[in-house]
Image (cartoon, rainbow, N blue to C red):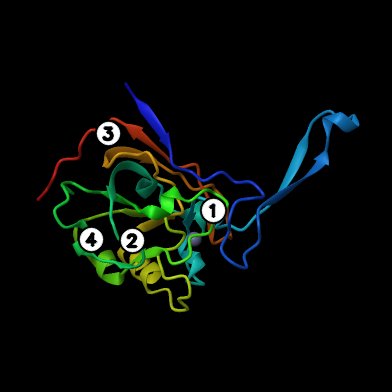
Amino acid sequence: MTRIYDISRTLSPSLAVWPGDMPFSFTHSLRLRDGAAVNLTTLTLSAHTGSHIDAPYHVVDEHIHPADLPLEPYIGPAHVVTIDRRQGGIVPDDFAGRDLAGMQRLLIHTWVSDLPDDRWPDGFPYPTVELADWLAERGVRLLGLDSPSVDQQDSQTLPCHHRLYAHGIANLENVRLSGVPDGVYELIALPLKIAGICGCPVRAILRTPASRPRSDG
Ligand SMILES: [Zn+2]
C-alpha cells in the first residue's frame, strides 16, 4: 500500500526563518465574518521560507528563476540517508557503508529534523564542495537537506550553492525527515511557477514504495 510522508515544514507566523529574513505573515483583505462573500488572505514571506528550493538566481544574477527550472530533479526516486554529523561540512565519508546503489536524489537526515518548526538550528551541518563533486560523479540530480542551507550559515561566498549549480544539481532545503526510515522513496517537491524570484516554498512529500532504480555501477 502506498504511504505518503509529508516532509514539509508548516508555514505559519511562528515558523523560524533565516536570522534577519522576513518572517512569514498574512493579512485578511476580506473576511466572511465582516460580511464579505469570501475570506481573502494576502501573504508576506521570503522565497526561502520553510521547506523550499533555491533557484540559481539566488547566487548568480544572470541565472534562472523558479518558473524556468527543469522539473525532472524535483520528482523521482530519492534515497533518504541518516548521518550522525551534528555540525560542520558533510563529506562523502559520512555515507561510508551505506547502500546508495542507483542513487538519483539524496535527502540527508540529521538531528535538525527533530527541531520543532519554531526553532532555528544554530550550527547546522552543511554539504561541502567535495560532497557536491561526489554526487555529480554518481549522476545525482537533487540534494535535499533538513538543514536550511547548502552552505555554512555565515558563508559569504556560498561555494556549495555555486558548485551544485555548476553540476546541474538542484537543492531542496529545510525539509523535515523525522519518522522517515532510511530507504528509497519517490520524492515530489515541485517548484511553484513564479518568475523573477530566487527560490520558492514547496510541498515536499515522499511516497512509498519507490521501485528501486537500476544501478549502473
Ligand atoms: Zn534557500
Q: Could you tell me how far apart the alpha carbons at marks 2 and 4 are, in whole angstroms? A: 22 Å
Q: Amino acid at mark 2?
A: Gly
**Callout in the foreground (1, 2):** 1
Label 3 sits on residue: 210
Quadrant for residue 172, please give it. bottom left
- Which of pointers 1 and 2 lies earlier in the amino acid sequence? 2
**Callout in the foreground (1, 4):** 4
Residue at 41% of width from left, 51% of height from top? 70
Label 4 sits on residue: 94
Instruction: Give the percent coordinates (x, y) of residue 100.
Output: 18, 49
- Which of pointers 3 and 1 lies earlier in the amino acid sequence? 1
Label 1 sits on residue: 200
Q: Residues within 10 Å of mark 4 (few under 14, many from 20)?
A: some
Q: Amino acid at mark 3?
A: Ala
Q: Disc 2 on helix, strand or loop? A: loop
Instruction: Give the percent coordinates (x, y) of residue 25.
Output: 70, 51
Q: Amino acid at mark 1?
A: Cys
Q: Disc 3 on helix, strand or loop? A: loop
Q: Could you tell me how far apart the alpha carbons at marks 3 and 1 are, in whole angstroms? A: 26 Å
Q: Residues within 10 Å of mark 2 (few under 14, many from 20)?
A: some
From the Cβ of disc 4, is ligand 1 less than 8 Å away? no
Label 2 sits on residue: 168
- Which of pointers 2 and 4 lies earlier in the amino acid sequence? 4
**Callout in the foreground (4, 3):** 4
